Image: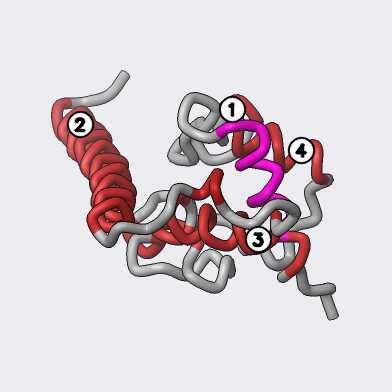
Amino acid sequence: MLDSSQHEVKRTRDKLNAYRLLAGLVATLVGALGYVIAGAAPLEQAAPGDAVRRGDQLFHSYCSRCHGVDADGKSPLAALLSTRPSNLRRSVLSRADKERMVRLGGAVNSRSPIMPSWQNELSRTQINDILDYLQSIRESKP
């Protein structure tokens, strides 16, 4: 049984995690709003067949706040998270596992519960474009 000081520590930790998640969501919304304000063309209107370029744009709009601009898991926000975002350049997950992770989020995949589900915001084509981009920047482990 937890004593009152342990309960207080747990409540504080839970609040901090909630604030971290909120900060990540706010950063994502601000980034998306900035993209819209800048007058960028809708991503679906990008040149046909250029999945890697579309995926690059999508990754930097949706994923880089946590996973870093270089997809290496190093971002200013990453330092605040209780679970460090994955280095996507060195990920050993299969394409199907990555697709499931993006679509359903981390908790469903027994990974970080901070990783959100994107299935209601990104189409299957957009998710596949992100996966094509990640494959294009993938590094082999030395």
Q: Amino acid at mark 4?
A: Asp
Q: Residue at x 55, y 73 (%)?
A: 70
Q: Residue furthest bottom?
A: 142
Q: Residue at x 58, y 69 (%)?
A: 72
Q: Is residue 79 above or below residue 121?
A: below
Q: Amino acid at mark 3?
A: Leu
- Magenta region, residue range: 123-134
Q: Earlier in the sequence, mark 2 or mark 4?
A: 2
Q: Earlier in the sequence, mark 1 or mark 2?
A: 2
In the rendered image, residue 30, in percent from the top left (x then y), is placed at 24, 51
Quadrant of the rendering where the N terminus is positioned:
top left
Choose top left, top right, bottom left or bottom right for residue 104: top right
Mark 3 neighbour density, 10 Å: few (under 14) some (14–19) many (20 or more): many
Q: Which residue is mark 1?
A: 104
Q: Which residue is mark 4?
A: 97
Q: Is residue 116 above or below residue 65?
A: above
The CA distance from mark 1 to mark 3 is: 17 Å
Residues at marks 1 and 4 touching, judged by CB atoms closer than 8 Å: no
Q: Which mark is residue 11?
A: 2
Secondary structure type for disc 1: helix
Q: Which residue is mark 3?
A: 88
Residues at marks 1 and 2 touching, judged by CB atoms closer than 8 Å: no
In the rendered image, residue 12, in percent from the top left (x then y), is placed at 18, 38
Mark 1 neighbour density, 10 Å: few (under 14) some (14–19) many (20 or more): some
Q: Earlier in the sequence, mark 2 or mark 3?
A: 2
Q: Residue at x 34, y 68 (%)?
A: 76
Q: Amino acid at mark 2?
A: Arg
In the rendered image, residue 118, in percent from the top left (x then y), is placed at 51, 33
Is residue 46 a member of the stretch shown in magenta?
no
